[in-house]
């Protein structure tokens, strides 16, 4: 792992620039994605069939995954996996129910009523990767908050497979997906955004994917809503001399194994811990099945930073604004107030990041590439709309006329002013 030195501001600028480089969109990918989107808009289902043959080597006659395949998945899924999904579902539901919002109404003066309605998004599309990146936990994390929000219809798409991973279809059924379609890639995102003869148009698209999926989501944003444009996985660990090098190394590798572009950053005020963590990482890599991926991530993107003190560690990590933040310190909860920017926080020596990925209930769809400075984890709030309303009586309009028309004339918008004046000209 590379060690960085200098002031906190200098180190933060280096890390942020590295993040941007990793997440930079490829111009060739953008052009290819735009062509695919246009093709799906123009040719609909036939374009999807052609791309399925080209990219997935499967000739589809029907895009929808039938009940027979779902029943088969339930019959084949490992019983322990099914039980774990059930338990994770319960935790995700109990956590996200607390995010439910309620509307409000007040009457600040006579004849005036103001308020806000909370309404669910009508139809949501969830993208679920296939192959080696098929994660049933992500199905639960995307679908359950939408169900709690009251979304009326949830469409899931996933790339065509000769044999589906049973847990993916099982998780979809457990979470409450209404329909599942076999379509992936940029073409799948286009189908959700614009609709085809078989696949209905949705109002918002969520879920992870490769660079083609992420670029397609970026391209269709505005036609539909999206959750975020996610970059490579990342973890930041703040650790002092009380931390276990073995634990810290294991947690850094838990993200490094995702992707060669994943980032693992350790900030500590202990040179001794830093040396021990480096040695542990090398030892643990030797027996890791995904060693090639994790090693590339650690060697190219792993960073160890030595800070002067505890305040310096938190100051730097707040500038980094990591997707996952572990605080590997005694009495870690006492330091929570020092956290300003992070997607999700894991407190103490035993709260490893995978607890959040799979089980605790907090969402694992998180902002990356320092975007936790202005955005948050996926949640119920992503699947609702807030609709404002106001009502003024004639007397209330008369009382407010001068202020309203003064501002309208000041902005040169005479018709705005007249729309108020005509109401008070009436008897």
Image (spheres, grey):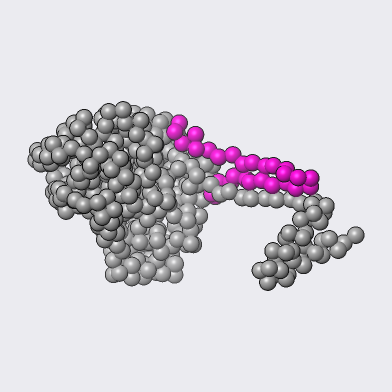
Residue at 79% x, 47% y is 111
Q: Nearer the viewer, residue 296 or 280?
A: 280
Q: Is residue 55 magenta?
A: no
In this view, 382 is above or below 187: above
Image x and y of residue 115, in percent: 66, 46
Give the x, y percent position of residue 66. 40, 46
**Residue located 56% across and 49% down the image:** 385
- Occupied quadrant, residue 80: top left
Question: Quick one: which residue is furthest to the right in this view?
Answer: 427
Q: Which residues are magenta?
A: 94-122
Does residue 261 appear anywhere in the picture? yes
Image point 21% across, 30% down: which residue? 242
- Of residues 218 and 64, the one nearer the viewer is 218
* Numbered label tally: 0
Q: Is residue 344 above or below residue 184?
A: above
Query: Would residue 46 be visible to someone looking at this image?
Result: no
Question: Can you say which quadrant of the picture contains the C terminus?
Answer: bottom right
Q: Image check: 237 left or right of 139?
A: left
Can you say whether 336 is above or below 124 in the image?
Answer: above
Residue for point 50% across, 44% down: 381
Place residue 177 in its image quadrant.
top left
Q: Horizontal and vertical percent for residue 290? A: 16, 44
Left or right: 123 with respect to 271? Answer: right
Question: 401 or 219, which is in the foreground?
Answer: 401
Residue 22, image x, y percentages: 26, 58
Q: Is residue 323 left or right of residue 422?
A: left
């Amino acid at each position: 792992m590379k060690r960085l030195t200098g002031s906190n501001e200098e180190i933060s600028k280096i890390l942020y620039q590295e993040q941007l480089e990793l997440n930079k969109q490829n111009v060739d990918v953008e052009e290819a994605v735009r062509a695919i989107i246009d093709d799906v808009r123009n040719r609909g289902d036939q374009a999807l069939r052609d791309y399925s043959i080209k990219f997935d080597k499967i000739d589809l006659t029907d895009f929808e995954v039938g009940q027979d395949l779902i029943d088969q998945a339930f019959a084949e899924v490992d019983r322990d996996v099914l039980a774990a999904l059930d338990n994770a579902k319960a935790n995700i539901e109990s956590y996200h129910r607390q995010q439910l919002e309620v509307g409000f109404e007040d009457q600040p003066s006579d004849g005036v009523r103001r308020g806000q309605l909370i309404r669910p998004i009508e139809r949501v599309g969830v993208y679920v990767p296939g192959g080696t990146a098929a994660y049933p936990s992500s199905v639960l994390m995307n679908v359950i908050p939408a169900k709690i929000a009251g979304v009326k219809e949830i469409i899931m798409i996933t790339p065509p497979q000769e044999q589906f991973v049973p847990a993916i279809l099982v998780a979809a059924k457990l979470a409450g997906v209404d329909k599942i379609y076999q379509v992936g890639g940029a073409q799948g995102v286009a189908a959700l955004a614009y609709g085809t003869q078989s696949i209905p148009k949705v109002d918002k698209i969520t879920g992870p994917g490769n660079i083609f999926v992420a670029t397609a989501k970026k391209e269709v944003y505005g036609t539909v809503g999206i959750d975020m444009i996610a970059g490579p996985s990342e973890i930041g660990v703040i650790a002092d001399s009380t931390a276990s090098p073995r634990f810290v190394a294991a947690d850094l590798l838990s993200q490094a194994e995702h992707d060669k572009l994943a980032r693992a950053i350790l900030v500590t005020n202990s040179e001794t811990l830093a040396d021990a963590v480096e040695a542990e990482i090398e030892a643990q890599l030797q027996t890791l099945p995904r060693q090639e991926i994790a090693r590339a991530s650690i060697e190219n993107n792993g960073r160890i930073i030595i800070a002067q003190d505890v305040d310096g560690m938190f100051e730097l990590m707040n500038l980094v604004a990591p997707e996952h933040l572990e605080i590997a310190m005694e009495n870690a909860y006492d330091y929570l107030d020092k956290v300003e920017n992070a997607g999700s926080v894991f407190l103490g020596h035993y709260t490893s990041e995978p607890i959040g990925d799979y089980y605790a209930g907090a969402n694992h769809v998180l902002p990356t590439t320092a975007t936790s400075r202005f955005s948050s984890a996926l949640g119920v709030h992503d699947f609702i709309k807030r609709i404002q309303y106001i009502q003024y009586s004639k007397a209330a309009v008369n009382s407010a006329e001068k202020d309203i028309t003064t501002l309208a004339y000041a902005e040169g918008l005479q018709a705005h002013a007249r729309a108020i004046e005509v109401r008070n000209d009436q008897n």
